[in-house]
Structure formats: C-alpha cells, structure tokens
Amino acid sequence: MRTKQKRHWKTKLHEVIYEADTPSGKLFDIVLLFVIIASIILVMLESVQSIDNKYHDILNISEWIITILFTIEYIARIVTVKKPLSYVFSFYGMIDLLSTIPKYVSLLFGGLHALAALRALRLLRVFRILKLARYLGASNTLVKALKASRVKISVFLFAVIIVSIILGTIMYLVEGEENGFTNIPKSVYWCIVTLTTVGYGDIAPVTPLGQFIASLVMVLGYGIIAVPTGIVTTEIATQNGDEKHEDIHLNSQSCPNCSTENHKDNADFCYNCGEKLNH
C-alpha cells in the first residue's frame, strides 16, 4: 500500500514538474519562468555599482531565496525520475545545475556570483510552457534541414574562405603597407569584414584600383549572404513536404524513466526506452 502511495506521489509530482500539458504543470512552468526572469533581473541590478551599494543586502537575500527554490526544484526533478542520471546529464539537467550552483560557489570564491546570469539559459523552457505542437515540429524541421544542408554549407564556406584569401592577397599587393594593409592576414581580415558587410572601417583602401576591388567585394557580399539562406530554405521546404504526409503531432509529455520528451499525442509508451507514459 505504501509503495502504491509512493508511486502515486512521485507520478503526480512528475506530471507537475516535467509536463506542461496539465493545468498544474503549466502553472508550475509559468511560475518557474517568472522566478527565472526575477533572478536574472537581480543579477543585472547587482552589477550596477550604485544600486548594489544601496540595496546589497536585499539583493543578496533575494538571490539566496531564489537559489534555494532552484535547489529544491532540482532535487525534485532528480527524485521523480527512475533514472536520475538521465536527467542530470541531459541538456536541461546541465542547464538547471549551472543555474543553481553559482551562488554556492561564490561562498568559496568571491566574485563568481555573476555566473548566476547563466540562469537566462533556463528561458529555453519557454517552448515547453507555450506547449504549441507546431513550434516543436518547426524546431525539429529546422534541425533536420540544417543537418541535411551541412555538406552544401560546408562547401560554400570553404569557397568563401578561398575567395577571401585570394582577394585579401590582391589587396595587399595593390594597397601595400603604407595604406594599412601591412600583411596578408590583415588584408584577409579586411576582406572578410567587407565581404560580410560588417565594415568596421579600421582599414580602408586608398588607391582607385583598391576602391574598385572593394566595391566588387561589397556587391559580392550581398550575394554570398543569400546563398546559405537559400540552401536552408530549400531543405526546410523539402522537410515540410515530407511531414505533410506523416501528420505527426507532438506534445510535451516526459517519460518518467528516461525523461525523453516530444512524444506523439495519445502515445502509451516512450519511444526511447519503452516505459509506460503517465496520462
């Protein structure tokens, strides 16, 4: 009887902490989001010397309260899964740990409390809080598109590097050291800055021929920016065409055993470990 009650308690807590499908789970995630935002604001305010001098004690106490809340939440996440290490070494698990320990570490090593700004990474949980299946599907589509186009993009970047080296070398020969192009690496740096339309302006061609070449590099830069965008967009369109035939709907349901997410609606078992899911 006690075992069943214990399982029931862990199951309920798991649904609240890990899943955003239930009202209690969504409320927990929304409250957590506001606490994360509050903790980030506190760290930002503490970095302002005038504010810290005036409200140091209040800011410090507030940070400790939030740190303790994060600690309780982190322990609860570990307790409610059957395989704690699967959560601890997961992406979100590492982020939760990094957002919790800075305040404790600052007790031993002063000045490291600013690392609490890492809590901003926890804002990634907003995708779970919104709980919109089309966003989950869109993120998967983007990842698949990037993986499918990685070879094309790699070849493209290699070509851009070659062009930058060639044009940088030409500018070194045309402009020379007297105009700021003191060596080939610095000339290649200028070419990359110009090609990407950043234009810092720390180095600029002076001769008419150099300015003409610079104009060509600028125009070429606009075309180069459009190429990777076109490659990825094509792959996304391909992925969307394939998914229309599958009609897959995902939710934020989390496996109580391995913490795997993004299961199909009405799924009874985890697609990763086969554990029965909570409903």
Image: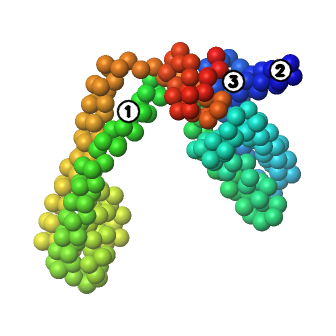
Mark 2 vs 1: CB contact within 8 A: no
Residue type marked 3: Glu
Q: What residue appears at the point 80 percent right and 39 percent down from the top-left corner?
A: 72
Whichever of callouts 2 and 3 sits on the residue coming sooner in the sequence is 2
- Colour scheme in use: rainbow
Q: CA distance from mark 2 to mark 3?
A: 15 Å
What label sits on residue 141 in the rendered view? 1
| Residue 3: image location, x then y, percent | 83, 24
* Mark 2 lies on residue: 5
Whichever of callouts 3 and 1 sits on the residue coming sooner in the sequence is 3
Q: What residue appears at the point 64 percent right and 16 percent down from the top-left corner?
A: 279
Q: CA distance from mark 3 to mark 1?
A: 27 Å
Dividing the image into 4 quarters, which one contains the N terminus?
A: top right
| Mark closer to the observer (3, 1) | 3
The residue closer to the viewer here, 3 or 114, is 3
The residue closer to the viewer here, 37 or 176, is 37
| Residue 51: image location, x then y, percent | 76, 53
| Mark closer to the observer (2, 1) | 2
* Mark 3 lies on residue: 15
Mark 3 crowdedness (10 Å alpha carbons): few <14, some 14-19, many ≥20: many
| Residue 95: image location, x then y, percent | 63, 46
Mark 2 vs 3: CB contact within 8 A: no
What label sits on residue 255 in the rendered view? none
Q: What residue appears at the point 70 percent right and 57 percent down from the top-left corner?
A: 114
Residue type marked 1: Thr
Residue 16 visible to the viewer: no
Q: What SS does tag 3 mark? A: helix
